[in-house]
Image (cartoon, rainbow, N blue to C red):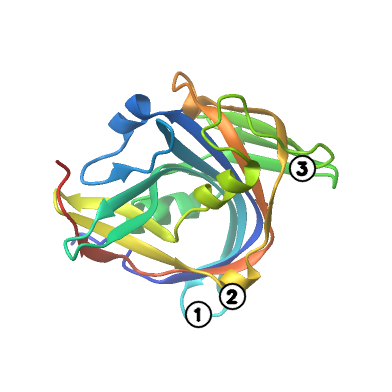
Amino acid sequence: MKIPRNAFTVAGSICQCWLFVYRLPVAIAQPLLPAPLRLVTQGGFAFMNIVVCRLSGMRPAPMPASIGLGYWHVAYRLHAWAMRSVGQEIEGLHFLRSDCDRWVMQRAGNLLTDFNFHRSRIRVVDDGASVTGFVDSPDAPAHFHIDRRQPPALSEGSPFSSLEEAAAFLKYKPYGLSVEGTESLQAVRVRRNEAEWTSRVVSVPEAEWQFLAGREAVLELCYEVEPIDYIWERGRSVRVVACA
């Protein structure tokens, strides 16, 4: 019997979190995104969102946090949208790959979700002034360095006029989107208390992701997100209009 994907509502907390957003040419991003999803674009660019986060208390809702699982999660997601058959847009993130440091999460994640989990060793060192991270993966290694002492700045060639404009545009909508068919998506809604969402843009003097190699990706900005509770609702089918 096949287990349906994203069939359970899951609760947990984000303890540490950094969101790296890269721009890449639409022509390069387009083959990565299956129809009927469409790329969110600005100035001829699409956007890849890479999250590095430490999760705790991950468990089926409404079970208590004390039985939950903690692990590091790195995920590569494209900003995407689709037109619903009722005439409204739905926007969110389409997962291309996830890395995690717990074998149980890899197996459960691939059995119960469509987030494409891989087992990797993930190390993050935060000394207050800076953050250094490593993803030890045979096929998608990565490392990054964040310097909290340096002011962040827009990269050359940005389609935005200011960091504030970029941050407002690139704050992702709370849906995970995957394809069920040519006219159907599965949407996983993310619930969080928006009044408790606190983030700031930080400087990234160095970052390298093998997953982005050859894709002409340029870092647009990096958010550092304060701890916050999340609920990932069970997936639901959404009828959409097929791409022209």
The secondary structure type at the circle numbered 3 is strand
Q: How many marks?
A: 3
Q: Nearer the viewer, residue 149 or 127?
A: 149
Res 65 label: 2
The secondary structure type at the circle numbered 1 is loop
Amino acid at pointer 3: Val
Select label 3 or label 2 by which is in front: 3
Quarter of the view holding residue 14: bottom right
Residue 222 pos. (x, y %): 63, 42
Res. 139 visible in picture:
no
The secondary structure type at the circle numbered 2 is helix
Indicate whether 208 appears above or below 52: above
Res 212 label: none
Q: Nearer the viewer, residue 169 or 182?
A: 169
Residue 45 pos. (x, y %): 42, 32
Q: CA distance from mark 3 to mark 2?
A: 25 Å
Label pair 3/2, CB-CB below 8 angstroms: no
Amino acid at pointer 2: Ala
Res 125 label: 3
**Left or right: 106 in relation to 121:** left
Q: Residue at x 36, y 31 (%)?
A: 29
Q: CA distance from mark 1 to mark 2?
A: 7 Å
Amino acid at pointer 1: Met
Q: Residue at x 36, y 29 (%)?
A: 26
Mark closest to the chain's N terminus, 3 or 2: 2
Q: Which residue is mark 1?
A: 63
Q: Residue at x 41, y 56 (%)?
A: 108
